[in-house]
Image (cartoon, grey):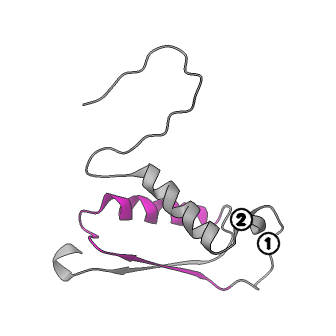
Amino acid sequence: GHIVVEGNLNKPVINAGDGVGEHPTQALLDLFTIVDELDMIDKISSPPDEGEEEPLVVVLLGDLKHGRTVHSLAKLLARSQEGFLRRKLILRYCSPSVLK
C-alpha cells in the first residue's frame, strides 16, 4: 500500500518503485555503476569533446517483459544521454522470446 508522509522532511525521499512497473533506485545505482566503471565521472564536469566519443552501447539482458529494473534503467539512460552522459547511446535488448 501507499504510505502518506506528512509534515516537513529534513532528508530527501527517493521512490523505490511502484511494485511491478518501475524500480528507480536500482536504475540510479546501475547508472552510477556504468559511469564509475567507464571512468566517466571526471568527464561529467568537463566540456564535451566534439565527435571524439564513441557511442555508449548498453545491453539490457534478461526478463524484458516483466523486469522493472530494465524498464527504469532504459528510461534513465535515454534521458541521461543528452544530459550528463553527453554521448550517443545505443540500447540493445536481449532476452528469450517469451520474455520480450
Mark 2 → mark 1, Cα distance in angstroms: 13 Å
Q: What amino acid type should be assigned to the residue bearing mark 1?
A: Pro
Question: Under tag 2, what secondary structure?
Answer: helix
> Compared with residue 26, is residue 46 higher up or lower down, i.e. above or below?
below
The numbered disc on residue 41 is 2
| Left or right: where 74 falls relative to 53 | left
Residue situated furthest left in the rendering: 98
The numbered disc on residue 10 is none
Residue situated furthest right in the rendering: 47
Per the image, the residue denoted by label 1 is 48
Residue, x 79% and y 72% (percent of image)?
48
| Left or right: where 98 falls relative to 80 | left
Magenta stretch bounds? 54-82
Q: Quadrant of residue 68?
A: bottom left
Residue, x 83% and y 66% (percent of image)?
46
Residue, x 21% and y 81% (percent of image)?
96
Residue, x 29% and y 74% (percent of image)?
62
Q: Nearer the viewer, residue 29 or 67?
A: 29
How crowded pointer 2 is (Cα within 10 Å; few <14, some 14-19, many 20+) is rated as some
Name the quarter where the N terminus is drawn: top left
Question: Under tag 1, what secondary structure?
Answer: loop
Q: Please provide percent x and percent y for residue 57.
A: 53, 81
Q: Please provide percent x and percent y for residue 40.
A: 69, 70
> Compared with residue 91, is residue 69 higher up or lower down, i.e. above or below?
above
